[in-house]
Image (tube, rainbow, N blue to C red):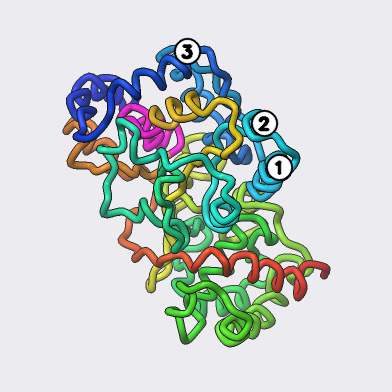
C-alpha cells in the first residue's frame, strides 16, 4: 500500500480528531455552504513542477469534496501579489479582490499585516487546526506573530545538493564553501536576489558570519545592519570572483541550478525542501548518485503559510480549501516524495499509525542526516539585505 493510498484510509481513521473543543460546528457548516460554488484564486509560486502538480491534485479534491473551484495563479514573486492586493484595497475594492488565498510568508506577510490588508483571524478556528504540532514555529513567521492571520501548511529547511560521483566530500560551513569554490572555480553559484532561494542563502551566510545573531531577531536598524552585515560583504567579495561566470551573473532560480548540477556545470545546488533531491531523482532530473547535505552548524528553517487578503471575494471557499490543505490526507499526500516531499506541520502523534512510518521514510537522495535548524532573521532584514545586495552586486 503506497503513501497516497494510506492517506485515503487515514482520513477515515482521523475523523474523530476533528471534534476539537470550542469549535462552532454550526458556523463551519455555514462556511462550507457558502463555499460551495465559489471560485478560489490561489496565488502561489509556480516554479516547481512537483508543487504545481500537488496544487492541481488538491484543487481537484476540493472540487469533488466541497464543490469549490480552485484556480492556481502561478506567480514568481509573492511581493508582486502583495502590491496587487494593496493597490486593489487602495483603489476601493474592499470585497472584489483578485486574490482569495495566497502562499506567503516572511516580509510579505509582515507588510500585509502592517497594512491591515489581511482577513482574520481565521486560521485557528479551522476544524483541522487541532492536528497542528504547536511545538513547531506555527505561530511566528520570521519572528512576526501570526495571530491567526495565516495558516501553516508545510515546513522547510535550506538544504544543499551534490553528486556523490563528483563531490564525495561537500563543504560543511561558509568557510569550507569558500575554500571549495576556490578549489573548483566557476563551478559554484547561487540564485540572483531577490529570488527566494538566493535571499535564503545570503541569510544563511549572515547567520554564520556575524558575531551578533541576537540582533537579527529584532527589527532592523541602519546601525545594526551596518555592523551585522560587514563580515558578509567581506566574505562575498572573496567568494564572487570564484563563482560561475566570476560572480558577474547568477542563475535565475534553484530550478536552473538543479539543471546545471545535472549537466555538470555546477557542483552544488540548493533547495528549501530536504526531500527535493529525492523527488528530482525519481523524476530523472538528477542522477541516482545525487544526495542532500547541510552545514554542521545548522541551516535556516521555517514554516510556510497561506493567508487570505482582506478584500478576498471567496473568503469561505478560501477557508474550506485551506482546511483541506491542513488535513491528514492532504498533508500525507504532500509529504510523499513522489508527489512533492514537503514536510508536514501536523503533530505526528495525531496522525494514524499506518501513515507515520511512511511519512518519516527517507528515500534515496533526501536529507538523511541531522541538521540543526536555525531561526529566520526578523522579516525586516530581508528587504534591507536584498536592497544592499542589489546595490553591490546586482548590476555586474
User: Quadrant location of residue 223?
Assistant: bottom right
Q: Residue at x 59, y 65 (%)?
A: 382
Residue hosting label 3: 67
User: Which numbered disc, 2 or 3, marks the residue that appears first in the sequence?
Assistant: 3
Contact (CB < 8 A) between labels 3 and 1? no
Contact (CB < 8 A) between labels 2 and 3? no
Q: Residue at x 34, y 33 (%)?
A: 126
Answer above or below: position of 295 versus 138.
below
Give the structural element (helix, strand or loop) at label 2.
loop
User: Which numbered disc, 2 or 1, marks the residue that appears first in the sequence?
Assistant: 1
Determine the CA span between mark 2 and mark 1. Answer: 8 Å
| Residue 233 located within the stretch drawn in magenta | no
User: Which quadrant: the C terminus?
Assistant: bottom right
In the image, 291 versus 315, the foreground residue is 315
Determine the CA span between mark 2 and mark 3. Answer: 20 Å
Residue bounds of the magenta highlight = 325-340
Position of residue 362 measured from the top left corner of the image (x, y, whole percent): 32, 45
Give the structural element (helix, strand or loop) at label 1.
helix
Dot 3: few (<14), some (14–19), or many (≥20) neighbours within 10 Å? some
Answer above or below: position of 269 versus 321.
below
| Residue 339 located within the stretch drawn in magenta | yes
- Viewer-side label of 3, 1: 1
Q: Residue at x 54, y 75 (%)?
A: 206
Residue hosting label 2: 98
User: Which quadrant: the N terminus?
Assistant: top left
- Viewer-side label of 2, 3: 2
Determine the CA span between mark 3 and mark 1. Answer: 27 Å
> Which label number is shown at residue 84?
1
Position of residue 108 measured from the top left corner of the image (x, y, whole percent): 59, 53
Amino acid at each position: 500500500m503506497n503513501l497516497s493510498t494510506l492517506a485515503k484510509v487515514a482520513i477515515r481513521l482521523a475523523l474523530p480528531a476533528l471534534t476539537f473543543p470550542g469549535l462552532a460546528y454550526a458556523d463551519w457548516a455555514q462556511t462550507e455552504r457558502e463555499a460551495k460554488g465559489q471560485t478560489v484564486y490561489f496565488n502561489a509560486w509556480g516554479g516547481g513542477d512537483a508543487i504545481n502538480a500537488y496544487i492541481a491534485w488538491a484543487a481537484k479534491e476540493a472540487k469533488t469534496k466541497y464543490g469549490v473551484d480552485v484556480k492556481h495563479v502561478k506567480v514568481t514573486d509573492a511581493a508582486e501579489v502583495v502590491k496587487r492586493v494593496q493597490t486593489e484595497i487602495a483603489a476601493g475594492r474592499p470585497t472584489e479582490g483578485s486574490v482569495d488565498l495566497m502562499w506567503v510568508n516572511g516580509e510579505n506577510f509582515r507588510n500585509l499585516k502592517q497594512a491591515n490588508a489581511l482577513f482574520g483571524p481565521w486560521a485557528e478556528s479551522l476544524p483541522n487546526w487541532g492536528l497542528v504540532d504547536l511545538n513547531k514555529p506555527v505561530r511566528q513567521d520570521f519572528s512576526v506573530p501570526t495571530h491567526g492571520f495565516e495558516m501553516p501548511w508545510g515546513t522547510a529547511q535550506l538544504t544543499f545538493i551534490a553528486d556523490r560521483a563528483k563531490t564525495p566530500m561537500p563543504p560543511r560551513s561558509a568557510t569550507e564553501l569558500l575554500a571549495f569554490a576556490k578549489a573548483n572555480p566557476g563551478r559554484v553559484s547561487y540564485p540572483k536576489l531577490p529570488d527566494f532561494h538566493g535571499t535564503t542563502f545570503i541569510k544563511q551566510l549572515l547567520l554564520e558570519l556575524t558575531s551578533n545573531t541576537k540582533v537579527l531577531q529584532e527589527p532592523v536598524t541602519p546601525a545594526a545592519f551596518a555592523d551585522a552585515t560587514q563580515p558578509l560583504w567581506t566574505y562575498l567579495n572573496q567568494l564572487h570572483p570564484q563563482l560561475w561566470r566570476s560572480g558577474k551573473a547568477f542563475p535565475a532560480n534553484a530550478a536552473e541550478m538543479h539543471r546545471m548540477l545535472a549537466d555538470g556545470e555546477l557542483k552544488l545546488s540548493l533547495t528549501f525542501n530536504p526531500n527535493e533531491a529525492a523527488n528530482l531523482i525519481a523524476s530523472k532530473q538528477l542522477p541516482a548518485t545525487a544526495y542532500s547535505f547541510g552545514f554542521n552548524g545548522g541551516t535556516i528553517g521555517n514554516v510556510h503559510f497561506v493567508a487570505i487578503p482582506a478584500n478576498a471575494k471567496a473568503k469561505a471557499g478560501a477557508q474550506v480549501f485551506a482546511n483541506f490543505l491542513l488535513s491528514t490526507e492532504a498533508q500525507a499526500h504532500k509529504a510523499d516524495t513522489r508527489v512533492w516531499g514537503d514536510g508536514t506541520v501536523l503533530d505526528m502523534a495525531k496522525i494514524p499509525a499506518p501513515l507515520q512510518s511512511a511519512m518519516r521514510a527517507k528515500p534515496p537522495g533526501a536529507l538523511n542526516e541531522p541538521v540543526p535548524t536555525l531561526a529566520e532573521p526578523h522579516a525586516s532584514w530581508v528587504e534591507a539585505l536584498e536592497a544592499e545586495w542589489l546595490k553591490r552586486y546586482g548590476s555586474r
